[in-house]
Structures are given as structure tokens and as C-alpha cells.
Amino acid sequence: MSPTPSPHSFAARTEEHLLHTVGVAPAAASATELMHAVAQAARAELAQRWVQTQAADRGARARRVYYLSMEFLIGRTLSNALAALGQNDGAAEALGAHAKAMEEVADHEPDAALGNGGLGRLAACFLDSMASLGLPSFGYGIRYEYGMFAQEIQNGAQVEHPDPWLADGTPWEFPRWELSYPVRFGGWVEHVDGKAVWRPAGEVAAKAYDLVIPGHGTKKVSTLRLWKATAPAHIDLNAFNTGDYQRAATAKNEYENISWVLYPNDSTPAGRELRLKQEYFFVAASIQDMVKRHLDEHGTLSNLADQVAIHLNDTHPAIGVAELMRVLVDEHGMDWTPAWAICRRTFSYTNHTLMPEALETWPVGLMQHVLPRHLEIIFRINKEFLDFAAQFRPGDNGFLSRLSLIDEAGERRVRMAHLSIVGSHKVNGVSKLHSDLLVQTIFADFAALWPERFTNMTNGVTPRRWLAQANPGLSSLLDRHIGHGWRRDLDELHKLAPLAANPEVRTEFMEVKRANKARLAALIARTTGVQVNPDALFDVQVKRIHEYKRQLLNVLHVIGRYQAILANPKGPDGQGWVPRVVLFAGKAASSYHMAKQIIRLIHDAGRVINNDPRVGDLLKLVFIPNYGVSVAETIMPGADLSEQISTAGTEASGTGNMKLALNGALTIGTDDGANIEIREAVGDANIFIFGLKTPEVQALRASGYQPMRHYEGQPDLKAVLDAITGGQFSPEEPGRYRGLVDALLWGGDHYMLLADYASYVATQREVDALYRQPAAWCQRAIANVAGMGVFSSDRTIREYARQIWRIEPKP
Ligand SMILES: *Cc1c(COP(=O)(O)O)cnc(C)c1O
């Protein structure tokens, strides 16, 4: 029997919520009901902190940052909230009374998967840091009814299911009933006495739902305000009364579908108009909200730029530049020139990709149809900008057409990145390499005009979720040896470095890793049915499936290794093979055929390899379905080797690389994105870098890359590709992977897998050699953890706050 909790304790309040809020007999409560009750007890404390933070910021008339993002990949909230509130023990006490463990109960919360991958997870890590640094801040986004699709694997292929994460309600949101803003679409523009009057064709109401983002080590919180689209009138009552129920419902749906689904970011024309409406919808609601708050506090918009920083997470919210101009000029009667000055001082923009095909553009015709007044504003911004730019290179029409906000080649399109740059005072990339390449390549003309506008903010991850919460074993080791301070000051990890030489610390560290691998092995068994040996080297590549990330290069190595094991059971140097578990996870955009084929090949090859008795435990190839934040939280701590193998110059930063190294995995990676800075931080001896570097990739492309030469010249590589095209892994459909291999051999191998293959395989041999020496491996793994302090998102947010937003974080 556990003792009765004291009446005001967290446990007692949880017990009350079980009866009063959840409405069940406490003795009969299920794990889900307990999850809700604990969440309600935590929610009450969060509400208090939210009210206090708002009052303090209002009282101080604080300068605030508004982080606009189409995606927030939050994951679960319960464990994070309890840690931030200091209520882990209280919750354990509450659950103990019901003979339940925290882990089991927490598992019943659905992930808030309001994002696709790295970009959305970055936004979530940033909110955690903004709250923990006490930065007056709001995240603004969309309350998608259906988040990122759930991935199921059927016969080795990806099948997508909707993600109705709100179906059973979420204990974490605060509906703000009184907060509703109209958002208008379509129609036409009249010009009356030199004033533009927009006559929209339709209107939808944006309703606010808040998620409170707790800070750690502070009572400050941040707010994630998500907008839900609601039809202005519930249903068309006329239609309803005449019995036309269908029409009544259609009118409602036509508006409300704006916040229904998160689109996988790589998808194609389908639903493009809806996507544009989504972008404008949440931006327009957010700007109305911040303007209202500003007027409440200051009574004038003339000082808006002194009090408000608006950050664009990629170009999805870029229409905000035109919207703020419309609000200032059309609705508040400000002159164009001062309005534009305010705009430029208010906005800043983060670019996330160098790939030209991934830069967002909208057909002028579509924008005319959906946002006619905004298109006019964009044309005026463009005219004034091009007049300005022409002074620098008179007569250079190429320069001007490259800079223009309108792409005039073919169907005219609005370039959202150009609008973002012109409308912002700072533009940043997300790693040193990426930021350098931005000004050398896609934004070179803008950098020639405004070199001081471009800067770098290397990404980071929150140590609260990705170490303290995900890896309790390592956290407790750190607490014992270097104290508790690392949660709020990740640079404290430096203190671990000298301990790598201490055999007792190494033993402890290895025990922690072994336990995490056992936990991961259990997840693999549960989700794939494959039993893996926790003592094998766990080789992990988890991220969205994309050709540039080169999961296929990894598969080629696995198949090459399989063939080598069969050909040479004693190992390449007679010392036997290091047993490996190669683990993949990740989703493919639903319209991305090649990515889906890669998932299929992983499963087909895995089935053959995993069932070959000659291989046994020496090699396993597994794919954990439905990658997301919660799955990642189990994978990261159990990894030995982190695969970060994108073609040099293609991965803007990566943050998966940071989470894995922070949890003691060694990186095998290319000279790309943040891998370069990880190498600088942990030291050359503690990372495996291979392959072509960015200038070499560029040079090879320029000189005429011939992938076939590698096929003809490398018998081991040829054997791998021949096995795939020969149907060895798909005997029921031998031609299944023709397209995949043809794209390498005949399609130009755009991401240069074959050029990097030999270097990759040779480096994997070095990995094996090191893994044979457990003490040496462990020493390097510890050096990785010790060097990762700089990759805390707290460091990143401090840099944004000081250098871009000009808000000093409160101590
Ligand atoms: C960190 C993270 C990502 C980003 O991974 P990369 O390897 O940087 O592409 C994507 N999805 C989830 C769920 C993550 O946690």
C-alpha cells in the first residue's frame, strides 16, 4: 500500500482530476485515463505560469518575437511538462497508487505531429529554448486536424493513413474562445481616390488554440498559438431549411478544410490552391493578433518595429511581408514608405534549402485569384526594388531578372524566397557551410547588393527532450559525474571529456548504452518481428526518405557487406565480421516514387538477409515504421553509429546528426551541413568523414560525371547493382528496381552515390576496426557527448535573439 498523498500534492490533484475531469472511478482507471488525469494536473500549473508570463510581458511592454512556421513537430507533451514543472516525483507517486509506471502511461499520448521532419522539429526545439531563456515569444502555426500521415508497411511498401491526433481530444490545448479573426480570400481590388479597396469573395474565421510551452529551470513559458479555420456561419441555414443538407455542409467544409491536413512538403500540384490558402490563413490571423496586442499596449503602429520581431521559418509564411504592408497601408492609412521601413525592420527569414527545385514559387495567376491585393503589393515592392537594384548595375538586365520577385520564364511565378529577402533585415542559413553556399550560389545577387543582410545561425536541439527525457540512463551518469547544470547550460558537457580516460566511467557509459540498445532491440522486435542482438553494432539512419540523403548508398553498402560475408565468412582481414544491425526509419512523401522504392528495397533486401542462415547475427537490416518524435526518442539513445551521408552541399544542416552524437553515437558522414561543425567540436579522431567535398562535387558535375565508370571499374559495386537488377531481392518481380538502378547508371546519378561508394565502404571498414576495441570506441563515444554543448538550441536561440531579433534573453 502506498501512503495517502497529502491533500494539496500533485498526486492528490491528479486523483481529483481522475474523478472530476476525466470522470472515472479511480480504482478502475485505465492507462489512458491516468494519462489524462496527470496531464490535467500539469495543465493547471501550466495555466498559472502562462497567465503570469503574459502579465509580466505586458507589464514590461516587452519586445516580443513571433516565430511563424507552417510546421511544429512537437511530439508528446506529458514527460516534458512534468520535467519542466518539477513534478516527475509527484506524477510517479500518483501513478504508483495505481500500480502504473510513467513510461507506460506516457505511451498513451498521441504525438502532435504537426510537421514533416527537420524544419518542424527545429521549430519545436526553438520554442523549448525560447521558453527556457525567458524570451517573450509566440510560435504561430496551424492547428491541423490531421498531422503528418501515419506510416504502415504492407508487403514491404509504405501505406499512408490519416493521423487524427485530436480525435480523443488533447488535454494540452487552451481554446481561446474570444479570439477569432476574419481571414479573407479572392475577389477583386478597386482603386478609389488613390486608395486600394479589396472586395474579397469569401471569408473564414481563424480561431486560436494555445499550447503552453514550459520553460525548464524557469517559470516562464512560451505560447504556441495554432489557428483553426471555421466557417463564418455554422451552416447555410437556408439550404438546410430547404432540405439541401449536402449544400449546407459543402459551404461549411469549403472554409474549414483550410486547417484539415498538413501537406507532406514535397508533394505536387494537387491541393496547391489550398496550400496557398493555408499559408495566408495562418499568417493573416497571426498578424492581426500581434497588431491587436501591439495597439493594446502602445496605441500606435509607428513603433511596431521597435516592439515586434517576426521570423519566417522558411518561405511558407512569406506572404506576411505583403500582408503587413496591406494592414499598415490599406487598413491603417500609413504611407507606403514608412510602412515599408517598418516591414523591413520587423521581418527576418531563415532559408532551409539550396536546391532550386525546392524553392517555393506561386503562379501569378493563382495568386491573382486567391490574393489579388497582395499581388498588387508584391508588384509594387518589386518595382521599387528593381529600380533600386538597377542603380548598381545599370543596363544589366540579367542581374535584374535574376533578382526579380517574379520569375518571367514560362508561366510567371512569384518567388517567395525573393520576397522574404527583400522584406527582411536579416537572412540566415542553418549551418556555416549552408550559409556560405547561400551567398555564393542561389542568393549571390542579393548578397552583392546587401552583404550585411546575410548571416549564419547553426541549428541546435533541445537537451531537455533529446538527452534528459530520451536518455535517463546517460542523464543520471552525467548528473553523478558532472552535476545537473547541463540541462540549462549544455557547455557543461565539456567536463565529461577528461573522464573518457577513466575505465570506471567507461564501464558505466557502456552499461547505459547496452541498456538503451536492449530497449531499442525490443522496439525493433515489437514493430518488425525481427530479433536483433543488442551486442551488435547498431548502425542507424533515421530521417525523411529522400534521394539527396542517400539512404540508397547505405543499402548498397549493406548488400555489399552481405555478399562479402557470404564470399568470405572469416572477414575481410581474417578477424571475422563485426555483427551489425542496420536500422532505418523515415517517411517518404506520398507522391515521391523513388523514395518509396527505396523503402521497398530496404524491406526486400532485409527479408533475404535476415533469413539467410549463413549470415545469422552478423548482419540484420530492419526498418522501424512510422518515424516520428516518439520513435526517435527511443532510437537516438540506442545508436552506436549515426549515418549522415548526404551528397556534400545538399543537407542544409541536419539536426538528427546532433541528437545522435549527443547520445553517444559516432558519426559516419560526408563533409556536409552541420557534420562539418560536429567534426570541429568533437575532433577529427572521433568522427568518420568520407567522400567528395562540396567543391569536388561541383567540379565533378562541371567536368561531366560518368557513373558508369564506377560500375565498370569496381567489381564489388557492380555485383551489388547486378544483384538488385537481377531480382535477387525481388524474385517475384525481378524488374522491380530497374528504375532505381537505371537512375544511377543511365540517369546521371544526380547525387553521386557511385562516386562516393568506394570511400564509404573503406570508411565502414574503419568503423568495424574501431568497434572491435570496445574501450577505444567508448572513449570516442564519450568524446562525442562531451563536445556537443555548442549544439544546444539554447545557443542557437541566444544568437537569434541577440543578432537578429535584438531581444536580450533574461537571466
Ligand atoms: C530530428 C528529426 C528530424 C530531422 O532529422 P535529419 O536527420 O536532420 O533530417 C526529422 N524527423 C524527426 C521526427 C526528428 O526528430
Image: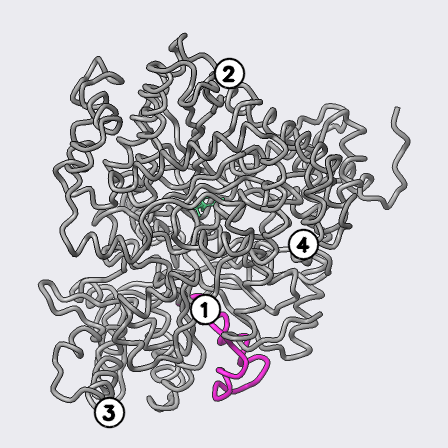
Relative to 176, residue 779 above or below: above
Q: Which residues are magenta?
A: 284-311
- The amino acid marked with disc number 4 is His
Ranked by sequence position, the earlier of labels 1 and 4 is: 1
Q: Mark 1: which secondary structure?
A: strand
Q: Residue furthest front?
A: 573
- Residue 768 horizontal/vertical position (percent): 48, 30
Mark 2 residue's CB less than 8 Å from ligand 1: no
Mark 3 near mark 1, Cβ–Cβ under 8 Å? Answer: no
Magenta region includes residue 287: yes
Which residue is found at the position 42% from the left and 31% from the top? Answer: 765
- Residue 183 horizontal/vertical position (percent): 37, 65
Q: Give the residue pinned by disc 4.
A: 494
Observer able to see residue 281: no
Ranked by sequence position, the earlier of labels 3 and 4 is: 3
Q: Nearer the viewer, residue 453 or 680?
A: 680
Q: Give the residue pinned by disc 1.
A: 311
How much space separates mark 3 and mark 1, taking CA atoms? Answer: 34 Å
Circle 4 packing at 10 Å, graded few (<14), some (14-19), many (20+), is: some
- Residue 740 horizontal/vertical position (percent): 20, 32
- The amino acid marked with disc number 2 is Gln
Q: Give the residue pinned by disc 2.
A: 531
Which tag is nearer the camera, tag 2 or tag 3? 2
Ranked by sequence position, the earlier of labels 2 and 1 is: 1
- The amino acid marked with disc number 1 is His
The disc label shown at residue 193, or none: 3
Q: Residue furthest left?
A: 410
